[in-house]
Amino acid sequence: MSLHLFNTLTRQVEPFAPLEPPRVTMYTCGPTVWNFAHIGNFRTFLFEDLLRRHLEWSGYDVFHIMNLTDVDDRVIKAAAAAGKRLAELTEPFVRAFFEDRDFLRIKPAHVYPRATQYMTAMITLVQRLLERGVAYRGEDGSVYLAIAKFPGYGRLSQLDRRQLKVGARVASDEYAKDDPRDFALWKKTDAVDEQVGAAWDAPFGRGRPGWHLECSAMSLAEIGERFGVQTLDLHCGAIDLIFPHHENEIAQSEAATGQPFARTWLHGAFLNVKGTKMSKRYGNFLTARDLQEQGVDAGTFRTLVYQTHYRQPLDYTDEALDAARKGSLRLGEFRERLENEDGRRRTGADAGDRLGDLARQLEADVRAALDDDLDSPNALARVFDFVRAANGELDRGAGGSGVAAALAVFDRVMGLFAVLPGGRQVAPELERWVHERLAARDRARKSKDFKEADRIRDELKARGVEIEDTPAGTRWRVV
Ligand SMILES: [Zn+2]
Protein backbone atom coordinates (compact mmCIF):
# COMPACT_ATOMS: atom_id res chain seq x y z
CA MET A 1 0.00 0.00 0.00
CA SER A 2 1.15 3.52 -0.68
CA LEU A 3 0.62 6.43 1.68
CA HIS A 4 -3.03 7.17 2.40
CA LEU A 5 -4.15 10.19 4.44
CA PHE A 6 -7.45 11.46 5.78
CA ASN A 7 -8.21 14.64 3.86
CA THR A 8 -10.45 17.02 5.82
CA LEU A 9 -11.61 18.50 2.53
CA THR A 10 -13.28 15.24 1.44
CA ARG A 11 -13.63 13.57 4.87
CA GLN A 12 -12.03 10.50 3.35
CA VAL A 13 -8.83 8.52 3.55
CA GLU A 14 -7.26 9.04 0.12
CA PRO A 15 -4.08 8.00 -1.64
CA PHE A 16 -1.59 10.82 -1.19
CA ALA A 17 -0.62 12.37 -4.52
CA PRO A 18 1.56 15.47 -4.56
CA LEU A 19 1.43 17.88 -7.49
CA GLU A 20 4.97 17.26 -8.72
CA PRO A 21 6.48 14.20 -7.03
CA PRO A 22 8.92 13.61 -5.45
CA ARG A 23 8.52 17.20 -4.23
CA VAL A 24 6.04 17.77 -1.40
CA THR A 25 5.24 21.28 -0.24
CA MET A 26 3.99 21.21 3.33
CA TYR A 27 2.62 24.20 5.22
CA THR A 28 1.96 23.94 8.93
CA CYS A 29 0.36 26.82 10.85
CA GLY A 30 2.92 27.89 13.42
CA PRO A 31 2.73 29.44 16.85
CA THR A 32 1.51 32.91 17.72
CA VAL A 33 4.54 34.24 19.51
CA TRP A 34 2.81 36.27 22.22
CA ASN A 35 3.53 33.58 24.82
CA PHE A 36 5.12 30.12 25.22
CA ALA A 37 3.57 27.41 23.07
CA HIS A 38 1.74 24.82 25.22
CA ILE A 39 1.94 21.04 24.99
CA GLY A 40 -1.33 20.97 23.07
CA ASN A 41 0.37 23.02 20.35
CA PHE A 42 3.33 20.66 20.52
CA ARG A 43 1.09 17.66 20.10
CA THR A 44 0.08 19.14 16.74
CA PHE A 45 3.69 19.92 15.84
CA LEU A 46 4.69 16.34 16.74
CA PHE A 47 2.03 14.85 14.49
CA GLU A 48 3.36 17.07 11.71
CA ASP A 49 6.91 16.02 12.56
CA LEU A 50 6.01 12.35 12.18
CA LEU A 51 4.24 13.08 8.90
CA ARG A 52 7.32 14.84 7.60
CA ARG A 53 9.73 12.12 8.73
CA HIS A 54 7.54 9.44 7.18
CA LEU A 55 7.33 11.34 3.89
CA GLU A 56 11.11 11.69 3.83
CA TRP A 57 11.54 8.04 4.74
CA SER A 58 9.25 7.20 1.81
CA GLY A 59 11.53 9.07 -0.58
CA TYR A 60 9.69 12.36 -0.90
CA ASP A 61 11.58 15.60 -1.09
CA VAL A 62 9.70 17.68 1.47
CA PHE A 63 9.78 21.45 1.63
CA HIS A 64 8.32 22.39 5.01
CA ILE A 65 7.10 25.91 5.76
CA MET A 66 6.01 26.96 9.24
CA ASN A 67 4.93 30.53 9.84
CA LEU A 68 5.39 32.55 12.99
CA THR A 69 2.47 34.82 13.75
CA ASP A 70 4.18 37.87 15.17
CA VAL A 71 1.30 40.29 14.65
CA ASP A 72 -2.38 39.62 15.33
CA ASP A 73 -5.03 40.64 17.87
CA ARG A 74 -3.44 38.69 20.72
CA VAL A 75 0.14 39.81 20.03
CA ILE A 76 -0.93 43.46 19.89
CA LYS A 77 -2.92 43.17 23.10
CA ALA A 78 -0.03 41.51 24.91
CA ALA A 79 2.51 44.05 23.61
CA ALA A 80 0.31 46.96 24.67
CA ALA A 81 -0.22 45.45 28.13
CA ALA A 82 3.54 45.03 28.55
CA GLY A 83 4.29 48.51 27.18
CA LYS A 84 6.47 47.00 24.46
CA ARG A 85 6.87 47.24 20.71
CA LEU A 86 5.88 44.13 18.74
CA ALA A 87 9.38 42.79 18.16
CA GLU A 88 10.40 43.38 21.77
CA LEU A 89 7.51 41.22 22.90
CA THR A 90 7.82 38.46 20.30
CA GLU A 91 11.59 37.97 19.97
CA PRO A 92 12.06 36.09 23.28
CA PHE A 93 9.08 33.85 22.48
CA VAL A 94 10.46 33.07 19.03
CA ARG A 95 13.74 32.00 20.66
CA ALA A 96 11.87 29.99 23.28
CA PHE A 97 9.85 28.26 20.59
CA PHE A 98 13.00 27.15 18.76
CA GLU A 99 14.50 25.89 22.04
CA ASP A 100 11.34 23.93 22.83
CA ARG A 101 11.27 22.55 19.30
CA ASP A 102 14.85 21.29 19.68
CA PHE A 103 14.16 19.87 23.13
CA LEU A 104 11.24 17.89 21.70
CA ARG A 105 13.39 16.78 18.71
CA ILE A 106 11.08 18.31 16.14
CA LYS A 107 12.82 18.66 12.79
CA PRO A 108 13.21 22.33 11.89
CA ALA A 109 11.08 23.55 9.02
CA HIS A 110 13.00 24.75 5.97
CA VAL A 111 11.68 28.28 6.44
CA TYR A 112 9.94 30.18 9.23
CA PRO A 113 8.36 33.21 7.57
CA ARG A 114 7.28 35.90 10.02
CA ALA A 115 4.18 37.92 9.29
CA THR A 116 5.83 41.29 9.92
CA GLN A 117 8.43 40.53 7.25
CA TYR A 118 5.91 39.75 4.50
CA MET A 119 3.95 42.98 4.32
CA THR A 120 4.53 43.46 0.59
CA ALA A 121 3.11 40.00 -0.17
CA MET A 122 0.11 40.70 2.06
CA ILE A 123 -0.62 44.09 0.58
CA THR A 124 -0.36 42.67 -2.94
CA LEU A 125 -2.80 39.89 -2.07
CA VAL A 126 -5.37 42.32 -0.64
CA GLN A 127 -4.93 44.51 -3.72
CA ARG A 128 -5.64 41.56 -6.00
CA LEU A 129 -8.76 40.62 -4.05
CA LEU A 130 -10.00 44.23 -4.27
CA GLU A 131 -9.36 44.29 -8.03
CA ARG A 132 -11.29 41.06 -8.45
CA GLY A 133 -14.24 42.47 -6.56
CA VAL A 134 -14.11 39.77 -3.85
CA ALA A 135 -12.91 42.25 -1.23
CA TYR A 136 -14.30 45.65 -0.34
CA ARG A 137 -13.49 48.55 1.92
CA GLY A 138 -15.96 48.91 4.82
CA GLU A 139 -17.12 52.28 6.20
CA ASP A 140 -14.84 51.62 9.16
CA GLY A 141 -11.80 51.85 6.82
CA SER A 142 -10.88 48.14 7.07
CA VAL A 143 -10.87 45.80 4.06
CA TYR A 144 -13.14 42.74 4.17
CA LEU A 145 -13.60 39.63 2.09
CA ALA A 146 -17.16 39.21 0.81
CA ILE A 147 -17.74 35.52 1.51
CA ALA A 148 -20.88 35.48 -0.64
CA LYS A 149 -18.65 36.25 -3.66
CA PHE A 150 -16.62 33.07 -3.15
CA PRO A 151 -18.87 30.12 -4.03
CA GLY A 152 -16.61 27.55 -2.37
CA TYR A 153 -16.91 29.19 1.03
CA GLY A 154 -17.74 26.67 3.75
CA ARG A 155 -16.55 23.56 1.90
CA LEU A 156 -13.75 22.68 4.31
CA SER A 157 -15.77 23.20 7.48
CA GLN A 158 -18.94 21.80 5.85
CA LEU A 159 -20.82 24.94 6.60
CA ASP A 160 -24.35 25.32 5.40
CA ARG A 161 -24.09 28.26 3.02
CA ARG A 162 -27.58 29.36 3.92
CA GLN A 163 -26.12 30.38 7.28
CA LEU A 164 -23.90 33.01 5.67
CA LYS A 165 -24.60 36.40 7.13
CA VAL A 166 -24.37 38.31 3.89
CA GLY A 167 -23.09 41.84 4.35
CA ALA A 168 -22.43 41.39 8.10
CA ARG A 169 -18.81 41.83 9.14
CA VAL A 170 -16.44 40.59 11.80
CA ALA A 171 -13.17 42.34 12.60
CA SER A 172 -11.89 39.93 15.23
CA ASP A 173 -9.40 37.17 14.24
CA GLU A 174 -11.38 34.46 15.99
CA TYR A 175 -15.09 33.74 15.88
CA ALA A 176 -17.47 30.81 15.94
CA LYS A 177 -18.66 28.56 13.13
CA ASP A 178 -22.27 29.61 13.62
CA ASP A 179 -21.27 33.16 12.81
CA PRO A 180 -19.89 33.11 9.26
CA ARG A 181 -19.55 36.71 8.17
CA ASP A 182 -17.29 38.80 5.98
CA PHE A 183 -13.92 38.82 7.72
CA ALA A 184 -11.20 41.45 7.87
CA LEU A 185 -8.25 41.05 5.51
CA TRP A 186 -6.73 44.34 6.52
CA LYS A 187 -7.62 46.21 9.68
CA LYS A 188 -7.52 49.98 9.82
CA THR A 189 -4.91 51.20 12.31
CA ASP A 190 -5.98 52.41 15.73
CA ALA A 191 -3.99 54.17 18.44
CA VAL A 192 -2.86 50.93 20.11
CA ASP A 193 -1.57 49.51 16.80
CA GLU A 194 0.51 52.66 16.29
CA GLN A 195 1.78 52.52 19.85
CA VAL A 196 3.15 48.97 19.50
CA GLY A 197 4.34 49.44 15.91
CA ALA A 198 1.68 47.29 14.25
CA ALA A 199 0.83 49.65 11.39
CA TRP A 200 1.88 49.68 7.75
CA ASP A 201 1.08 51.96 4.83
CA ALA A 202 -0.97 50.45 2.00
CA PRO A 203 -2.78 51.86 -1.04
CA PHE A 204 -6.08 51.00 0.65
CA GLY A 205 -5.17 52.70 3.92
CA ARG A 206 -2.74 52.43 6.80
CA GLY A 207 -3.41 49.29 8.79
CA ARG A 208 -2.33 45.78 9.64
CA PRO A 209 -3.11 42.31 8.33
CA GLY A 210 -5.74 39.98 9.73
CA TRP A 211 -4.41 36.66 11.02
CA HIS A 212 -5.95 34.58 8.22
CA LEU A 213 -4.41 36.73 5.50
CA GLU A 214 -0.93 36.12 6.88
CA CYS A 215 -0.89 32.37 6.19
CA SER A 216 -2.28 32.77 2.66
CA ALA A 217 0.19 35.47 1.70
CA MET A 218 3.24 33.78 3.19
CA SER A 219 2.55 30.28 1.88
CA LEU A 220 1.77 31.54 -1.63
CA ALA A 221 4.87 33.76 -1.59
CA GLU A 222 7.11 30.87 -0.50
CA ILE A 223 5.90 28.25 -2.98
CA GLY A 224 5.39 30.78 -5.77
CA GLU A 225 8.94 32.09 -5.62
CA ARG A 226 10.59 28.74 -5.11
CA PHE A 227 8.58 26.40 -7.28
CA GLY A 228 6.36 28.58 -9.45
CA VAL A 229 3.17 26.94 -8.12
CA GLN A 230 0.11 28.28 -6.27
CA THR A 231 -1.05 25.02 -4.71
CA LEU A 232 0.31 23.40 -1.56
CA ASP A 233 0.47 19.62 -1.36
CA LEU A 234 -0.22 19.53 2.36
CA HIS A 235 -1.66 22.02 4.77
CA CYS A 236 -1.81 20.98 8.42
CA GLY A 237 -2.93 22.30 11.76
CA ALA A 238 -5.03 21.54 14.81
CA ILE A 239 -8.76 20.89 14.36
CA ASP A 240 -9.75 24.22 15.89
CA LEU A 241 -8.14 25.91 12.87
CA ILE A 242 -10.63 24.43 10.40
CA PHE A 243 -13.03 27.28 11.04
CA PRO A 244 -12.59 30.12 10.56
CA HIS A 245 -8.83 30.12 9.95
CA HIS A 246 -8.42 27.54 7.21
CA GLU A 247 -11.78 28.23 5.62
CA ASN A 248 -10.72 31.86 5.29
CA GLU A 249 -7.27 30.95 4.01
CA ILE A 250 -8.91 28.97 1.20
CA ALA A 251 -11.26 31.81 0.28
CA GLN A 252 -8.53 34.45 0.14
CA SER A 253 -6.05 32.29 -1.72
CA GLU A 254 -8.35 30.69 -4.27
CA ALA A 255 -10.24 33.90 -4.99
CA ALA A 256 -6.88 35.51 -5.80
CA THR A 257 -5.15 32.71 -7.73
CA GLY A 258 -8.02 30.73 -9.25
CA GLN A 259 -6.10 27.59 -8.23
CA PRO A 260 -6.82 25.06 -5.47
CA PHE A 261 -4.97 26.32 -2.38
CA ALA A 262 -4.05 22.94 -0.88
CA ARG A 263 -4.57 19.41 -2.16
CA THR A 264 -4.70 17.70 1.20
CA TRP A 265 -5.76 19.17 4.55
CA LEU A 266 -4.75 17.35 7.71
CA HIS A 267 -5.98 18.23 11.18
CA GLY A 268 -4.78 16.92 14.52
CA ALA A 269 -7.05 16.40 17.52
CA PHE A 270 -6.63 18.09 20.90
CA LEU A 271 -4.63 17.18 23.92
CA ASN A 272 -6.56 17.24 27.20
CA VAL A 273 -5.01 17.28 30.63
CA LYS A 274 -6.64 14.80 32.99
CA GLY A 275 -9.82 14.84 30.97
CA THR A 276 -10.14 18.61 30.77
CA LYS A 277 -9.39 20.90 27.87
CA MET A 278 -6.15 22.66 28.63
CA SER A 279 -6.65 26.30 29.45
CA LYS A 280 -5.10 29.05 31.54
CA ARG A 281 -8.46 29.38 33.27
CA TYR A 282 -8.40 25.80 34.63
CA GLY A 283 -4.80 26.14 35.72
CA ASN A 284 -3.78 23.08 33.68
CA PHE A 285 -1.85 24.94 31.02
CA LEU A 286 1.49 23.20 30.47
CA THR A 287 4.42 24.32 28.36
CA ALA A 288 7.44 22.37 27.12
CA ARG A 289 9.37 24.16 29.88
CA ASP A 290 7.03 22.69 32.48
CA LEU A 291 7.78 19.24 31.08
CA GLN A 292 11.51 19.82 31.46
CA GLU A 293 11.03 21.06 35.03
CA GLN A 294 8.94 18.01 35.86
CA GLY A 295 11.65 15.76 34.44
CA VAL A 296 9.61 14.60 31.47
CA ASP A 297 12.13 13.95 28.72
CA ALA A 298 11.51 14.21 25.00
CA GLY A 299 11.50 10.43 24.51
CA THR A 300 8.70 10.04 27.04
CA PHE A 301 6.57 12.85 25.66
CA ARG A 302 6.97 11.68 22.08
CA THR A 303 6.09 8.11 23.06
CA LEU A 304 2.98 9.38 24.83
CA VAL A 305 1.89 11.42 21.82
CA TYR A 306 2.51 8.72 19.23
CA GLN A 307 0.66 6.09 21.23
CA THR A 308 -2.55 7.88 20.24
CA HIS A 309 -3.65 8.35 16.65
CA TYR A 310 -3.38 11.99 15.58
CA ARG A 311 -7.13 12.22 14.90
CA GLN A 312 -8.05 10.95 18.37
CA PRO A 313 -8.10 13.17 21.45
CA LEU A 314 -5.14 12.50 23.73
CA ASP A 315 -5.47 12.56 27.49
CA TYR A 316 -2.36 13.63 29.35
CA THR A 317 -2.43 11.85 32.73
CA ASP A 318 0.18 10.68 35.24
CA GLU A 319 -0.56 7.04 34.42
CA ALA A 320 -0.22 7.58 30.66
CA LEU A 321 3.00 9.48 31.22
CA ASP A 322 4.38 6.75 33.43
CA ALA A 323 3.56 4.07 30.86
CA ALA A 324 5.18 6.16 28.12
CA ARG A 325 8.32 6.62 30.22
CA LYS A 326 8.57 2.87 30.77
CA GLY A 327 8.06 2.24 27.06
CA SER A 328 10.74 4.70 26.07
CA LEU A 329 13.18 3.21 28.59
CA ARG A 330 12.49 -0.29 27.30
CA LEU A 331 13.38 0.85 23.78
CA GLY A 332 16.56 2.51 25.04
CA GLU A 333 17.64 -0.62 26.93
CA PHE A 334 16.97 -2.77 23.92
CA ARG A 335 19.08 -0.54 21.71
CA GLU A 336 21.91 -0.68 24.22
CA ARG A 337 21.68 -4.45 24.31
CA LEU A 338 21.82 -4.68 20.53
CA GLU A 339 24.82 -2.42 20.44
CA ASN A 340 26.66 -4.44 23.07
CA GLU A 341 25.91 -7.71 21.31
CA ASP A 342 26.98 -6.16 18.03
CA GLY A 343 30.24 -4.98 19.63
CA ARG A 344 30.96 -8.49 20.89
CA ARG A 345 30.23 -9.87 17.44
CA ARG A 346 29.04 -13.14 18.84
CA THR A 347 28.77 -15.65 16.10
CA GLY A 348 25.43 -17.16 16.87
CA ALA A 349 23.98 -20.05 14.93
CA ASP A 350 21.27 -19.55 12.30
CA ALA A 351 19.24 -17.87 15.03
CA GLY A 352 21.05 -14.73 13.78
CA ASP A 353 19.15 -14.84 10.53
CA ARG A 354 15.91 -15.14 12.44
CA LEU A 355 16.75 -11.79 14.07
CA GLY A 356 17.42 -10.26 10.68
CA ASP A 357 14.09 -11.59 9.42
CA LEU A 358 12.26 -10.13 12.39
CA ALA A 359 13.91 -6.77 11.75
CA ARG A 360 12.98 -6.74 8.08
CA GLN A 361 9.41 -7.63 9.01
CA LEU A 362 9.37 -4.78 11.54
CA GLU A 363 10.39 -2.28 8.89
CA ALA A 364 7.63 -3.47 6.55
CA ASP A 365 5.03 -3.42 9.35
CA VAL A 366 5.94 0.08 10.49
CA ARG A 367 5.82 1.39 6.96
CA ALA A 368 2.41 -0.20 6.38
CA ALA A 369 1.02 1.22 9.62
CA LEU A 370 2.21 4.74 8.86
CA ASP A 371 1.03 4.50 5.26
CA ASP A 372 -2.42 3.85 6.74
CA ASP A 373 -3.20 7.46 7.67
CA LEU A 374 -0.20 7.68 9.99
CA ASP A 375 -1.33 4.96 12.37
CA SER A 376 1.45 5.56 14.89
CA PRO A 377 -0.13 3.57 17.78
CA ASN A 378 -0.16 0.50 15.57
CA ALA A 379 3.39 1.19 14.35
CA LEU A 380 4.69 1.55 17.92
CA ALA A 381 2.87 -1.61 18.98
CA ARG A 382 4.78 -3.43 16.22
CA VAL A 383 8.03 -1.95 17.56
CA PHE A 384 7.32 -3.27 21.06
CA ASP A 385 6.35 -6.69 19.67
CA PHE A 386 9.64 -6.75 17.82
CA VAL A 387 11.61 -5.83 20.94
CA ARG A 388 9.97 -8.69 22.83
CA ALA A 389 10.67 -11.22 20.06
CA ALA A 390 14.20 -9.95 19.43
CA ASN A 391 15.07 -10.08 23.14
CA GLY A 392 13.92 -13.69 23.06
CA GLU A 393 16.25 -14.41 20.15
CA LEU A 394 19.15 -12.72 21.93
CA ASP A 395 18.43 -14.74 25.08
CA ARG A 396 18.72 -17.84 22.94
CA GLY A 397 22.15 -16.66 21.78
CA ALA A 398 21.45 -15.05 18.45
CA GLY A 399 24.41 -13.13 17.12
CA GLY A 400 26.46 -12.45 14.03
CA SER A 401 25.07 -10.58 11.08
CA GLY A 402 21.49 -10.71 12.37
CA VAL A 403 22.40 -8.37 15.24
CA ALA A 404 23.95 -5.81 12.93
CA ALA A 405 20.91 -5.96 10.63
CA ALA A 406 18.53 -5.58 13.57
CA LEU A 407 20.48 -2.61 14.90
CA ALA A 408 20.47 -0.86 11.53
CA VAL A 409 16.71 -1.38 11.11
CA PHE A 410 15.97 -0.37 14.69
CA ASP A 411 17.89 2.88 14.26
CA ARG A 412 16.03 3.64 11.04
CA VAL A 413 12.69 3.07 12.76
CA MET A 414 13.75 5.14 15.78
CA GLY A 415 14.68 7.88 13.32
CA LEU A 416 10.98 8.11 12.50
CA PHE A 417 9.70 8.37 16.04
CA ALA A 418 12.72 9.69 17.97
CA VAL A 419 11.32 8.20 21.15
CA LEU A 420 14.47 6.90 22.82
CA PRO A 421 15.05 8.13 26.39
CA GLY A 422 16.83 11.39 27.06
CA GLY A 423 16.17 15.06 26.59
CA ARG A 424 18.38 15.24 23.62
CA GLN A 425 19.04 12.55 21.10
CA VAL A 426 22.08 12.45 18.87
CA ALA A 427 21.82 10.60 15.59
CA PRO A 428 23.81 7.35 15.78
CA GLU A 429 25.76 8.18 12.58
CA LEU A 430 26.78 11.51 14.07
CA GLU A 431 27.82 9.84 17.31
CA ARG A 432 29.96 7.29 15.49
CA TRP A 433 31.54 10.00 13.36
CA VAL A 434 32.34 12.13 16.43
CA HIS A 435 34.01 9.20 18.18
CA GLU A 436 36.08 8.46 15.10
CA ARG A 437 37.13 12.12 14.79
CA LEU A 438 37.98 12.39 18.49
CA ALA A 439 40.18 9.31 18.22
CA ALA A 440 41.96 10.86 15.22
CA ARG A 441 42.43 14.07 17.20
CA ASP A 442 43.91 12.14 20.14
CA ARG A 443 46.39 10.46 17.82
CA ALA A 444 47.35 13.84 16.33
CA ARG A 445 47.88 15.34 19.78
CA LYS A 446 49.96 12.40 20.94
CA SER A 447 52.25 12.84 17.94
CA LYS A 448 52.35 16.61 18.67
CA ASP A 449 50.60 17.49 15.42
CA PHE A 450 48.60 20.35 16.96
CA LYS A 451 47.75 21.85 13.60
CA GLU A 452 45.90 18.68 12.65
CA ALA A 453 44.25 18.53 16.11
CA ASP A 454 42.95 22.09 15.65
CA ARG A 455 41.74 21.27 12.17
CA ILE A 456 39.69 18.37 13.53
CA ARG A 457 38.25 20.62 16.24
CA ASP A 458 37.10 23.01 13.50
CA GLU A 459 35.72 20.13 11.49
CA LEU A 460 33.64 19.05 14.48
CA LYS A 461 32.53 22.59 15.13
CA ALA A 462 31.31 22.92 11.55
CA ARG A 463 28.84 20.13 12.32
CA GLY A 464 27.74 21.76 15.55
CA VAL A 465 29.86 19.65 17.89
CA GLU A 466 31.66 21.47 20.66
CA ILE A 467 34.45 19.75 22.55
CA GLU A 468 36.10 20.33 25.87
CA ASP A 469 39.30 18.68 27.10
CA THR A 470 39.07 17.63 30.73
CA PRO A 471 41.37 15.53 32.94
CA ALA A 472 38.86 12.71 32.45
CA GLY A 473 39.13 12.93 28.66
CA THR A 474 37.48 14.93 25.92
CA ARG A 475 33.80 15.77 26.45
CA TRP A 476 31.59 16.71 23.57
CA ARG A 477 28.12 18.04 22.98
CA VAL A 478 25.96 19.14 20.09
CA VAL A 479 25.10 22.83 20.26
ZN1 LIG B 1 -2.41 29.51 9.49
Image (cartoon, rainbow, N blue to C red):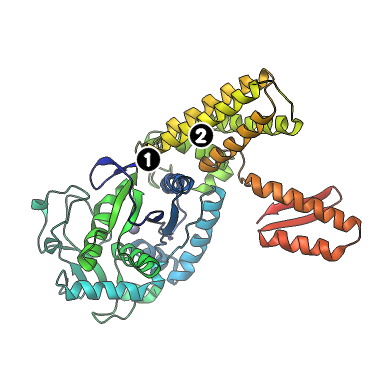
Judging depth in this view, the residue of 72 and 259 nearest the camera is: 259
Q: In the rendered image, which quarter is residue 71 located in?
A: bottom left
Distance from Cα at disc 1 to Cα at disc 2: 15 Å
**Is residue 213 visible from the viewing direction of this image?**
yes
Judging depth in this view, the residue of 250 and 337 nearest the camera is: 337
Element type at mark 2 = helix
Q: Position of residue 54 (x, y in %)?
A: 45, 44
**Is residue 319 visible from the viewing direction of this image?**
no
Judging depth in this view, the residue of 124 and 405 nearest the camera is: 405
Nearer-N-terminus badge (1/2): 1
Q: Is residue 1 left or right of residue 362?
A: left
From the image, tell me which residue sits under label 1.
Answer: 2
Q: What residue occupies the far right of the structure in this picture?
A: 447
**Which amino acid is tagged 2?**
Glu
* Residue at screen point 35% across, 74% down: 119
Q: Position of residue 372 (x, y in %)?
A: 37, 36
Q: In the rendered image, which quarter is residue 404 located in?
A: top right
- CB of mark 1 within 8 Å of CB of mark 2? no
Which quarter of the figure is the N terminus placed in? top left
Q: Is residue 75 above or below residue 293?
A: below
**Which amino acid is tagged 1?**
Ser
Q: Which mark is residue 225?
A: none
Q: Which mark is residue 363?
A: 2
Which quarter of the figure is the C terminus placed in? bottom right
Q: Is residue 206 left or right of residue 320?
A: left
Q: Quadrant of ligand 1?
A: bottom left
Q: Residues within 10 Å of mark 2 (few under 14, many from 20)?
A: some
* Residue at screen point 66% across, 50% down: 430
Q: Position of residue 89 (x, y in %)?
A: 46, 66
